Image (spheres, grey):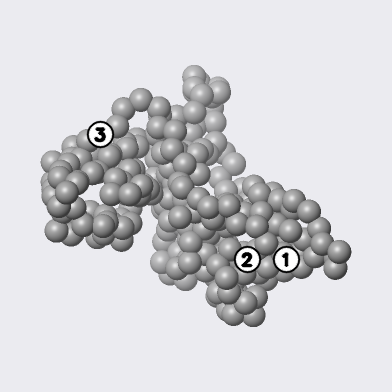
Amino acid sequence: MNREEELFRKRLEDLADRAYRRNVTVFTEFLNLNELNIFHQIQKDLSYVRCRSFGGYKSAERQIIAFLPDAPSYTGEDEDPAFPISCLCVRPLHDKYADKLTHRDYLGALLNLGIDRSVLGDILTDGNTARVFCLSRMADFLTGELTRVKHTQVQVLAETGNIDLEPKYEVVRGSVASVRLDSLLSLAFGASRSSLTGMIEGGKVFVNARLVTSNGYKVKERDLISARGLGRFRYVGVISGTKKGRLIAEIEKYI
């Protein structure tokens, strides 16, 4: 680990210690894939507390870790903690005059408000509407301050109740030699396996938020693969074989 990663590891350990010593639940802010990978590396060393992770919806990439005291006096042992996450719906004030807005546009407008990326979770776009997950303490600020994305005036409304969202995806099926990580990446992103070697070995590919640097890693059904700069997809499984011994694999590629 480099210096920055060591400091982050120490911060996680401090939060876990606080939960244990004070017998309270302690939350991180939203963690990116690198930070989640560090957490997974040290999780066994934090066995004196219980850990939960959530990002606002089932398949969230950016997630918050909750450290829960593992003590007899803790009454919520079998309950999931109430994560401090809010979901905001951002949409154009006037559809007629709206630009075509992308994930990058929404993220840029939010960060231009002077906030840190760690207070924001995933941003899911659907046409010109976006769902923004954020720390609950930031919800009122964002609702009042986010008025424009690019040249488009927007309104921001807090969504209430259970949030049951899934990113949109397209089903991709194709022939692969095996369910190795490099083969499935090639299927998902239309690149040669050899061109993806550097990306995998360079630490830019994560499986279920864990860093994987082996091209030959065998992917399991329902694994979620994220490739930095390319996107992410879920491996569904093998649906058939060919006469030449290859496999027809199916993935769900997030749009």
Check the image and report above or below for 199 versus 121: below
Q: Residue at x 24, y 43 (%)?
A: 90
Structural crowding at the residue carrying mark 1, measured as other residues with C-alpha within 10 Å and reported as few (<14), some (14–19) or many (≥20): many
The Cα–Cα distance between marks 2 and 1, rounded to whole angstroms, is: 7 Å
Three-letter amino acid code at the position of disc 2: Leu
Badge nearest the viewer, 3 or 1: 1
Q: Residue at x 57, y 39 (%)?
A: 48
The Cα–Cα distance between marks 3 and 1, rounded to whole angstroms, is: 44 Å
Q: In this figure, which residue is indicated by the disc labeled 1?
A: 176
Could you tell which of marks 3 and 1 lies nearer the N-terminus?
3
Decide if residue 234 is on the left or right side of residue 174.
Answer: left
Image coordinates for residue 122, horizontal then vertical, percent: 38, 49
Check the image and report above or below for 1 versus 148: below
| SS for callout 1 | strand
Q: In this figure, which residue is indicated by the disc labeled 2?
A: 187
State if disc 1 and disc 2 touch (CB < 8 Å).
yes
| SS for callout 3 | strand
Structural crowding at the residue carrying mark 2, measured as other residues with C-alpha within 10 Å and reported as few (<14), some (14–19) or many (≥20): some
Could you tell which of marks 2 and 3 lies nearer the N-terminus?
3
Could you tell which of marks 2 and 1 lies nearer the N-terminus?
1
Q: In this figure, which residue is indicated by the disc labeled 3?
A: 158
Q: Residue at x 19, y 46 (%)?
A: 95
Q: Which mark is residue 114?
A: none
Three-letter amino acid code at the position of disc 1: Val
